[in-house]
Image: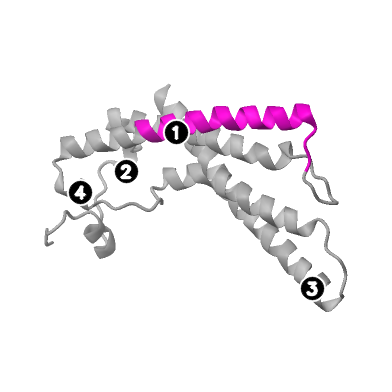
Amino acid sequence: MSRRFISAIEALSRLGGVSAVFLLIIAMVVMCQMILMRYLFRAPTIWQTEVVVFAATAAIFIGAPYVLLKKGHVGVDVIELMLSAPNRRRMQCLGAVLGLMFCVLMSVASGIYVYEAWEGGWTTPTIAAIPLWIPATPMLVGFGLLCLQYVVELMKLFRPELGVPEPQKAEAPTDEATLHSHQNLGEVR
């Protein structure tokens, strides 16, 4: 059950990563179209700016769980590397719990905002008048998926055997870059 839950959430996080890439491609294509229309054909742009901003913002929120899954976030691990393995694990658990708490609060706040935008009929103050619940929904989805990914990370911290599929457990890093990325501070291999 736990392994299936982890696999399902990690698949959702990967789907979020792929969706973020497509959103960024859409933003890039629309930006190029907007530049061509504005400067080459002297035509007005009405909807393009909002689409670019909303697509890029949605990519950030929807892609965040994938970044957490791949440990792609920026972090300074000097203190963590100096700690013993049990203390390092405790610190990672504390960070995951604090991250989960923040994401739960942001999910609730995002849900309230999306609901109020939907009920109030809020729109952007531009000619396009895009309903605000549309660009706000990726924030709710992203934080919801981030909560689930934090739960998965906590599950893997408390039960490390859930984090690595069976065939990969026996494998050891073989290339030099991987070996150096796993060495402790001051350790020479």
Callout 3: SS = helix
Contact, mark 4 vs mark 3 (Cβ under 8 Å): no
Q: Amino acid at mark 2?
A: Gln
Nearer the observer, disc 2 or disc 1?
Answer: 1
Image mark for residue 168: 2
Pick out the residue farthest to the bottom. Answer: 40
Asked whether residue 14 is drawn in magenta, I would say: no
The residue tagged 3 is 36
Which segment is the magenta one?
A: 97-123
Front label number (3 vs 2)? 3
Residue ID at (20%, 48%)? 79
**Separation of disc 1 and disc 3 at Cα?**
41 Å
Residue 104 on the magenta segment: yes
Q: Earlier in the sequence, mark 2 or mark 1?
A: 1
Prevailing secondary structure class for the magenta stretch in the rendered image: helix
Residue 79 numbered tag: 4
Q: Secondary structure at mark 4?
A: helix
